[in-house]
Image (cartoon, rainbow, N blue to C red):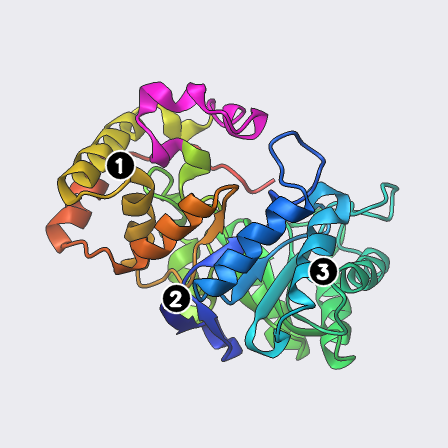
């Protein structure tokens, strides 16, 4: 495993962040606690020190499972991230959104489930159009000052919204978003237009979610709808990057992977490690084997011509993932 600094936080993290959305029982493709433990413990063995979950994942079960497993390890060397915006274990009008009430109560619930007094990175899980960003930032700033949160981050939104949030923090002397968790992969590169240059300028750590396109970049296009993972991936078939240039990029990933003797997933993940503005892609997996292969991808070398070959067919697609 290789390590890097997470934006302006100063925290050292592994170059792969283990995404924990698959831990729980809400959907049939998710892993129970024993199966999740196997993934988490193997990740630790492989040198992964960065874990990302959310209150909404399996209605809080993901946080509980992650917290239970990591309680047996030295958390001082680990970086734990969770999120707020959608309902956690309870669903009611104040269980979602980014009001002060929601943030404070959901943060307490998340800390209880994780078994932690302080979470390293607390992220807003999309923009809240009903709550002024200053209100949200003041609540997050108070959480930092109280020692419940070390750093704050954001996820998929428009660049003008993120710029507004950063400007509000600077103007009001409030804690600043230091990370961006956005959708970014070979067949969805719309973030390169505005968001990623903004993050680069502001020293924001970038943690792409779905770095393999929900599985689209792990198998040939014509095999995608044969996945056994369940509805989570099958529901992604209609996404904009599955058509047009996406098919050609998928084909080129397959071709280059075969040439280098690696899997398509490894090649698509290695592309992220060659993008300077990416800190650590968030990898979600239900397989120890796939986890091990992902770690091996850190060492895959892609030449400038390889990168150009993979990227050349790209065409603009509709914005996706901001809502």
Image check: 309 left or right of 109?
left
At 33% across and 19% down in the image, what residue appears? 222
Instruction: Judge the density around disc 2: few (<14), some (14-19), many (≥20) Cα neighbours within 10 Å.
Output: some
Q: Which residue is mark 3?
A: 68
Q: Is residue 187 visible?
A: yes
Q: CA distance from mark 2 to mark 1?
A: 22 Å
Q: Farthest left residue?
A: 305
Magenta residue check for 218 = yes
At 61% across and 40% down in the image, what residue appears? 323
Q: Which residue is mark 1?
A: 314
**Taking 45 as reference, is 28 above or below it?**
above
**Taking 247 as reference, is 114 above or below it?**
below
Residues in magenta? 216-238
Query: Which tag, 2 or 3, sits closer to the chain's start?
Result: 3
Magenta residue check for 278 = no
Q: Which residue is mark 2?
A: 200
Q: CA distance from mark 3 to mark 1?
A: 43 Å
Instruction: Judge the density around disc 1: few (<14), some (14-19), many (≥20) Cα neighbours within 10 Å.
Output: some
Q: CA distance from mark 2 to mark 3?
A: 35 Å
Picture coordinates of residue 211 (x, y %)?
Answer: 42, 46
Label 1: state its secondary structure: loop
């Amino acid at each position: 495993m290789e390590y890097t600094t997470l934006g302006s936080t100063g925290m050292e993290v592994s170059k792969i962040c283990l995404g924990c959305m698959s831990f729980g029982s809400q959907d049939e493709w998710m892993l129970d606690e024993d199966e999740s433990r196997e993934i988490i413990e193997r990740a630790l063995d492989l040198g992964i020190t960065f874990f990302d979950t959310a209150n909404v994942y399996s209605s809080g079960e993901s946080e509980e499972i992650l917290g239970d497993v990591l309680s047996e390890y030295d958390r001082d060397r680990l970086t734990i991230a969770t999120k707020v915006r959608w309902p956690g274990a309870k669903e009611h009008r104040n269980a979602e959104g980014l009001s002060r009430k929601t943030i404070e109560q959901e943060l307490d619930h998340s800390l209880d489930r994780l078994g932690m007094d302080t979470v390293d990175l607390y992220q807003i899980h999309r923009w809240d159009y009903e709550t002024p960003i200053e209100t949200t930032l003041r609540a997050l700033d108070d959480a930092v000052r109280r020692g419940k949160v070390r750093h704050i981050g954001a996820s998929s939104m428009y660049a003008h919204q993120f710029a507004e949030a950063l400007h509000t923090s600077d103007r009001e002397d409030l804690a600043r978003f230091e990370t961006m968790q956005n959708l970014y992969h070979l067949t969805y590169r719309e973030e390169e237009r505005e968001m990623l240059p903004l993050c680069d300028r502001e020293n924001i750590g970038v943690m792409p979610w779905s770095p393999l396109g929900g599985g689209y970049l792990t198998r040939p296009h014509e095999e995608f709808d044969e996945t056994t993972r369940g509805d989570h991936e099958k529901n992604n078939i209609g996404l904009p990057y599955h058509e047009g240039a996406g098919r050609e990029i998928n084909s080129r990933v397959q071709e280059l992977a075969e040439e280098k003797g690696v899997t398509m997933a490894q090649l698509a993940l290695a592309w992220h490690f060659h993008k300077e503005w990416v800190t650590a892609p968030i990898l979600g997996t239900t397989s120890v084997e796939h986890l091990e292969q992902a770690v091996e991808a850190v060492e895959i070398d892609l030449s400038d011509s390889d990168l150009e070959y993979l990227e050349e067919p790209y065409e603009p697609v509709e914005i996706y993932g901001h809502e």
